[in-house]
Image: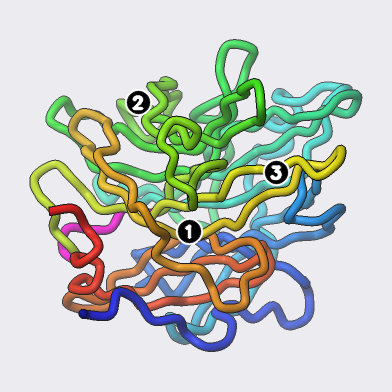
Amino acid sequence: MPLAYKQHSGKAVETNGIFKHVMAIALDPTASFKRGIVRCIVSREGDVSKAGYVDRSEIHYLAGDTLEHFTVGNEIKIAGAEEIIRKLSNDDLDFIGLEDPDIFVDEIAGLKHVYFTMPFLHKRKRGALIHLGHAFGKDLDSLEMVMPVLRETVKTEAAKELSIAPINSKGMRLNLFESGKKEIDFDYSVVRVAIAKGMSGPWEFGDIVFHPKEHGIPWIAGHASPGPLLPKSFIDIGEKKLLGIMNGREANQRVGKEIKYGIFSVGLFIYDYEVGKIDWVSPEPLIRDTEAVTITFASQFVETGKGEGILYAHVDDSFVRAYTLYADGLKTMLPK
């Protein structure tokens, strides 16, 4: 049977001792994927395997001499960020920094769009407001922040972890993102559609297209978060459909008064981007890093040759690993 993936040795991102934990890289295709953005953890309170931990973050430049070795650079300064954060905040909210960036290049307009998670913790009660933030500019050095493309309110849910879809026949993108759904037993992370008539936003909250509680797949029974959609040039699974990377977590467990998270792994899904529907999620995970205690979470894919590409994932929210994916091996895992 053909090999589906190979785990690379070592870490893909060198921090030079500045940060203990880095995660969630996004790479710029116009720089041959040798430049990008990375999330750096400034401080960590709590245990990543249990509910309630808090990471305070910054997003920094990332530069690589190869696709397997990157170095963290300076913090990215985004024009207008303080004003947008002020508009979204109040005395009861604590902003804990930009998280989990994604880069989209609009070649026609000559612009780069960067999307990121913007979490505001409630100071007097449990929980947070989580928006999908947005900045744009001619390059990564001239970004300006504007209002979020998706904003959590009393009428909507959280928005984070963007997966950008191609344009469909109606001229819009049915992008995917991670959202939240409170149930009687636990709070779940679900996959939802963002209806985007343009990349500048605002976008509309669409339907939930995958709820872990409703499917009974053990590796993704608690939390689901969409990762990158793989290009047709790498693997073609049919018209208006793409194979995607899905991040999934096993069901939560109550241990006394604490909620203990399950293992986060990387799996596969098939997305119909014409109508905004997930047709299939793999019954088993694809990748669980050999060093992972609780988390393997994918954020970026780069096609490197015919039927090959590099997937980047962070392990235990601490370091970034590279994995080579093989299209022939992945095809053996797909439904007929």
Q: Residues within 10 Å of mark 1 (few under 14, many from 20)?
A: many
Residue shown at 65% from the left, 32% from the top: 130
**SS under mark 2:** strand
First-in-chain label (2 vs 1)? 2
Residue shown at 58% from the left, 38% from the top: 145
Where does the image place residue 208, in percent across and percent down from the top left?
Answer: 41, 26
Given the image, on which type of amino acid does mark 3 rest? Gln
The verdict on residue 267 being magenta is: no
Q: Which residues are magenta?
A: 228-233
Residue 308 visible, this orientation? yes
Q: Residues within 10 Å of mark 3 (few under 14, many from 20)?
A: some
**Residue at image mark 1:** 299
Given the image, on which type of amino acid does mark 2 rest? Ile
Q: Nearer the viewer, residue 39 or 324?
A: 324
Where does the image place residue 326, in percent across and percent down from the top left?
Answer: 26, 75
The alpha-carbon separation of the residues under discs 3 and 2 comes to: 34 Å
Residue 113 visible, this orientation? no
Cβ–Cβ below 8 Å for labels 1 and 3? no
Residue shown at 48% from the left, 58% from the top: 299
Residue 253: which numbered mark, if any? 3
Given the image, on which type of amino acid does mark 1 rest? Ser
The alpha-carbon separation of the residues under discs 1 and 3 comes to: 26 Å
Q: Horizontally, is 243 left or right of 120 in the view?
A: left
**SS under mark 3:** strand
For the image, the number of numbered tags is: 3
First-in-chain label (1 vs 3)? 3
Q: Horizontally, is 219 left or right of 97 in the view?
A: left
Residue 195: which numbered mark, if any? 2
The verdict on residue 232 being magenta is: yes
Q: Which quadrant of the rendered structure holds the N terminus? A: bottom left
Q: Residue furthest left?
A: 239
